Amino acid sequence: MKINSTEIENFRNISHLKLDFDDVNIIYGENAQGKTNLIEAIELFTGSKSFRGVRDRELVKFGEEYARLRAEFENSTRKQNAEIIIKKNRQVSLNGIKKKSPTALGEELKAVVFSPVHLSMVKDGPSERRHFIDNALCQLKSNYRNILKDYNRSLTQRNMLLKDLQSNPSMQEMLYIWDKNLAASGAKIIYQRQKYIEALLPFAREVFEGLSRGREKLDLKIKGVFEYEEKSVDELYKELMYALDNSRSEDILNRITTQGPHRDDLEIMINSNSARTYGSQGQQRSCVLALKLAEASLLREMTQEEPLALLDDVMSELDIHRQDYILNHIKDWQVFITCCDVNTVLRLKEGKTFHIENGGLI
């Protein structure tokens, strides 16, 4: 996969940029000049939401009515073009044909992003780690996003019913209906997440071993209300129904659903110890890099396409060994790297450079 060129209008602090890209693209400049904005714009062509977790309308340059992004790209099928118009939400076109959802772009273009914001995957609560798995699965499985929507819809309805039971206890029998819906989609989510982590772990261990020079071992395990490993979707459904039934009194009391994949966590361990609790800053950063590079490797293996590698402000905080390892690991992919000092990356590998200042090219 490769983006050949892009044109950006009224996006964040960028009024207008038109750029042609190479295999290695180094975007440099001082802080708060627009480097990350360029990476963010490129990522939107994968159909994902902004990795910075903002709403679409916040992407439009202040004082403007809309933002427009265009890209010429190619994958194993053909050369293509895409356009994204952002107002209150995103409207996308692929090869001149309007699409119902931005996620349609994800079928044609895939990327893996590493940014300092992803350190929260190790440092913060379970939701960030669940989001990592779900976002990766959405790129791999076309129906996974719909399963998530079904689950979240059922979860919302069940929680609303739990609140209504305080004033109308006779509605309690309806809980069984939502339990079945929740367990049906929940079992599929658990199964897909479990299979994904099992497939990801060998790649993540290889990268982590390279980053730590073989001194440490990485382990990953999904923690849920019961043991998930080696269970079919039907077995997971039955156990999830049992868990929902057992927690019914607690759920009614607390007016919220306490069991299900929306409460699961991904345990990240270094030498059998929690990376979140006991890992150093360097170890936690290496964990995230290992997971992200493993995500890219698995994506390449399963789709037979090299995803874009978008590395936002990664190299400056790594020693030369880790920088060299990362660049060698993605040497056959198209890569976009942001940094303050262009020499940090150019001493390792040649690339096309873009000097960004105040949202423009200088």
Image (cartoon, grey):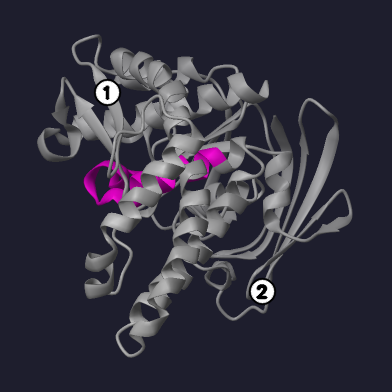
Residue under label 1, please give it. 219
Q: Residue at x 48, y 64 (%)?
A: 178
Rendered location of residue 249, percent (x, y): 24, 67
Viewer-nearest of discs 2 and 1: 1
Query: Residue type at mark 1?
Result: Asp
- Which quadrant of the figure has residue 2? top right
- Which quadrant of the figure has residue 317? top left
Question: Whole-Å distance between the Cαs marked 2 and 1?
Answer: 42 Å
Residue under label 2, please give it. 87
Element marked by disc 2: loop
Residue 140 lies, with reference to residue 168, above or below; the image says above
Q: Nearer the viewer, residue 68 or 32?
A: 68
* The residue stretch that appears in magenta: 117-137
Disc with the residue nearer the chain's start (2 vs 1): 2
Instruction: Specify whether 47 is left or right of 336.
Output: right
Instruction: Specify whether 67 is left or right of 136.
Output: right
Q: Nearer the viewer, residue 161 or 29?
A: 161
Crowding around mark 2 (Cα neighbors within 10 Å: few <14, some 14 to 19, many 20+) is: some
Q: Main secondary structure of the magenta part?
A: helix
Q: Which mark is residue 22?
A: none
